[in-house]
Amino acid sequence: MLIKTGIPSPEEIVKVKPGQSRLAKGPVAMVECFQRIPCNPCATSCPAGAIEPFKNINDLPKLNTEKCTGCSACVSSCPGLAIFIIDETYSDKEAVVKMPYEYRPLPEVKSVVEVTNRAGKVVGTGVVIQVVNNKKQDKTAVVSVAVPKELSMEARSIQIRKESTPENTFICRCEEISLQEVREAIAKGYTDFNELKRKLRVGMGPCQGLTCRQLVLTELSMATGQLVEEINLTTFRPPTKPIKISVVAGDGNEK
Ligand code: SF4
Ligand code: SF4
């Protein structure tokens, strides 16, 4: 399921879900990284040593939830946008999910936003309580959203409600392709993912389609009447981040 759609299965999610007793203690990371790729900023950025140092650069992250302080340093460092902080102690009825956010504009604090699940489907609403723009450090912004507690394991992104137009909505953040450009290309007859990839470069940036693929497929499905599963997919590769050759040859730590 992950390879075809980019969406992890419920079984994969269960494997990385922090235990209830840890969730009851306060904010903790949930590392939704399931593919062995040469990438380790999560481990090298963790000030608490909660993510074990990688023996091999292709290792999957191993999180010690008892050591994790929920600081979110790993969230802004992860190029795969795969880490979230869950705080189920925020209030009686609400949890806070801290999520990586690469769209622009950033949401405003106190704004009400649509909350979406891992498949991009709106599952409810939330309130933005903090926005940390890490642009100066060349890292991903982190948005904290208060959501109904039952959505703490579902809410993984947001959609800003106001003033969203096809022109200012970016489908592919890596290549900065707007919804308008995708719709215009489909209207001109580019009606499969590969054609759109060649024309617009969607899915060819560092995230390799992790974010845009599902959105483009949804647009194609709406325009052509085909089911998403029936649309031919392009080759899917994991997210990439340039690393020094010494990291591959050495001890796996990127310094
Ligand atoms: S939230 Fe902070 S302490 Fe927890 S794994 Fe991430 S960087 Fe480490
Ligand atoms: S994609 Fe994120 S979680 Fe996975 S190894 Fe890279 S930094 Fe760690």
Image: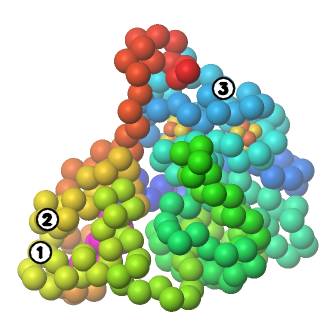
Secondary structure under badge 1? loop
Marks 1 and 3, how far apart at CA: 45 Å
Please tell me whether residue 1 belongs to the stretch shown in magenta: no
Residue 84 place in picture, x, y as percent:
65, 53
What residue is at 25 percent from the left and 76 percent from the top? Answer: 182
Q: Residues within 10 Å of mark 2 (few under 14, many from 20)?
A: few
Image quadrant of residue 232? bottom left
Residue that badge 1 annotates: 190
Q: What amino acid is found at the position of numbered circle 2 in the picture?
A: Lys
Answer yes or no: do the residues labelled 2 and 1 have beta carbons within 8 Å? yes
Q: Residues within 10 Å of mark 3 (few under 14, many from 20)?
A: some
Q: What secondary structure characterizes most of the magenta part?
A: helix
Q: Give the extent of the magenta segment.
A: 212-220
- Image vertical order of residue 202 relative to residue 207, above or below: below
Q: Which circle, 1 or 3, is nearer the viewer?
A: 1
Q: Which circle, 2 or 1, is nearer the viewer?
A: 2
Position of 100 with respect to 212 (left or right) is: right
Which mark is on residue 52? 3
Q: What amino acid is found at the position of numbered circle 1 in the picture?
A: Tyr
Q: Is residue 147 visible?
A: no
Outermost residue toward the top in this view: 250
Q: Quadrant of the N terminus?
A: bottom left
Q: What amino acid is found at the position of numbered circle 3 in the picture?
A: Glu
Q: Is mark 2 within 8 Å of ligand 2?
A: no
Sooner in the amino-acid sequence: mark 1 or mark 3 = 3
Image quadrant of residue 63? top right
Residue that badge 2 annotates: 199
The residue closer to the viewer here, 186 or 103, is 103
Please tell me whether residue 219 belongs to the stretch shown in magenta: yes
Sooner in the amino-acid sequence: mark 2 or mark 1 = 1
Q: Quadrant of the C terminus?
A: top right
Marks 2 and 1, how far apart at CA: 8 Å
